[in-house]
Amino acid sequence: MPLDPQAQSVLDVVAALNLPPNHTVSPAEARANAKMRPQAEGPEVAKVEDRTIPGPGPEIPVRVYTPAGPGPFPILVWFHGGGWVVGDLDSADGTARQLTVGANCVTVSVDYRLAPETKFPGASDDCYAATVWAAQHAGELNGDASRLAVGGDSAGGNLAAAVSLMARDRQGPALAFQLLIYPVTDRNFTTVSYIDNAEGYLLSKAGMEWYWDHYLSAPSEASNPYAAPLQAADLSGLPPALVVTAEYDPLCDEGEAYGARLKAAGTPTVCTRYDGMIHGFFGMWAALDKGKQAIDEASAALRKAFGTA
């Protein structure tokens, strides 16, 4: 379908900021520019706590959101997007609040190490460590370790898929669900969605090439399934998934390919493509009706996985 008029309005607002494309500036400049984009504020929650937890390298900053009520609550460990290069706890704040309220769960938002200062597998190792920590410390979070999910958007979706694979391979925490919002699953710039949506829709082909170049030490690392989950030989034994994609997104095809492979491997999987939408729409619920619809779908899927639907 044509580009959604609300999505076009968002593109117009972003264009008016006149910020240079990320791939034309340094990572530090890209991070500073990202903070200039408008961010939707999420709903109030009962409690928000910033803390640090042990990591495989330095301590990992996390932000813990707790909903109202007695608990214990299910737990969602959330990984922000930003191409492994930009993004932080503040950029994820609104979405984390939405999912905390919508799914009635404790959300642990993870400030994993960014590239290029920390290359692969630093981010995925941090995210796995945070997931293990959430399972082991569920009691102090007023959480229930038997109802534990991971999720993320874009690069965060990549990390959620990677953590699901790592938990399976390492006999780690049992995961009830993986929420994959337009996830990066492969380093392949030749898909139809990459070609059709190479530029003009917020995330560009050149931008993704830049992100991958900063994340990996060498292109050969893209064969590692913890970097590119679509490269995994076996996708069986993974938690149920919701894979959300957007029609006007370079990542659309690889997200749908991953969802199809999860289904083929016997993993209960729902794939939803939001027609007329652009990359990033999940975090734009204040401006996009379909952004709010996707938040609602994700929240309902989490509640079902947690047994609280």
Image (cartoon, helix red, strand yellow):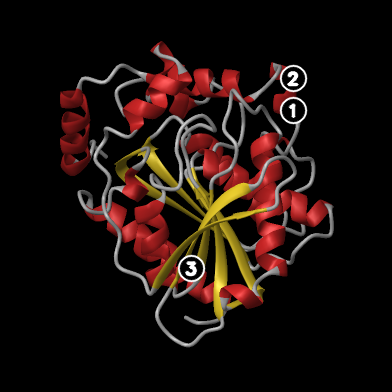
Kind of residue at badge 2:
Ser
Label 2 belongs to which residue?
A: 220
Label 3 belongs to which residue?
A: 301
Q: Circle 2 — which element?
A: helix
Q: In which quarter of the view is residue 257 placed? A: top right
Mark 2–mark 3 Cα distance, whole angstroms, equals 35 Å
- Of 191 and 156, nearer the camera is 156
Is residue 42 positioned above or below 100 on the image?
Answer: above
Which residue sits at x=22%, y=39%? 7
Q: How many tags in the picture?
A: 3
Instruction: Tell me the quarter of the image containing the N terminus.
Output: top left
Q: Is residue 149 visible?
A: yes
Q: Is residue 198 visible?
A: no
Which residue sits at x=52%, y=84%? 71
Label 1 belongs to which residue?
A: 223
Dot 3 surroundings within 10 Å: few (below 14), some, or many (20 or more)? many
- Of 150 and 122, nearer the camera is 122
Q: Circle 1 — which element?
A: helix
Pointer 1 with pointer 2, Cβ within 8 A: yes
